[in-house]
Amino acid sequence: MNRYAVIDIGGKQLRVEPGRFYDVRHFTSLQKISRSDVNIKVSINRVLLICHGSGVSIGHPWLSDAVVKGRILHPCFGNKIVIQKIHSKKKKRRNFGYREKLTRFVVDSICLNGRDLNDF
């Protein structure tokens, strides 16, 4: 069975499946997450699409009765981006880097009309 949902989180749209984990930039409700805050339960209401088997439910813009439930695993960092600024003919060079702060979360279940998709 092919069960997934498309959610709007952190300014991006993610295709999520139960049991998998994802890295996102921003959780609007949880801005500061420390390493000791693990297994915080979250529910995401901004669900754009749900596919369960051969049926597809599309929201306009969101499904009003759909919820994606999950939990936050830990904060993490993305890959480092190195920026080099070089001024030609002046021997002026500058290097600096940037790592994006991400939050890793796992999707536990996708609910539609108050029922889990595993029940369909």
Image: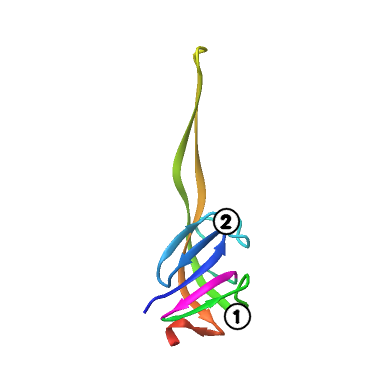
Q: Is residue 93 visible?
A: yes
User: Callout 2: helix, strand or loop?
Assistant: loop
Quarter the N terminus occupies: bottom left
In three-dimensional space, the C-alpha distance between marks 1 and 2, rounded to whole angstroms, equals 23 Å
- Asked if the stretch drawn in magenta spans residue 47, the answer is yes
Looking at marks 1 and 2 on the same chain, the residue that comes earlier in the sequence is marked by: 2
* Residue 35 horizontal/vertical position (percent): 49, 56
User: Is 91 located above or below residue 34 in the figure?
Assistant: above
Query: For mark 2, what is the residue?
Result: 26
At 57% across and 64% down in the image, what residue appears? 8
Which quarter of the rendering shows the C terminus? bottom left
- Residue at the spot of label 1: 65
Q: Residue 25: x and y, percent?
A: 54, 54
Percent position of residue 46, x then y = 59, 69
Colour scheme in use: rainbow
64 shown above or below 37: below
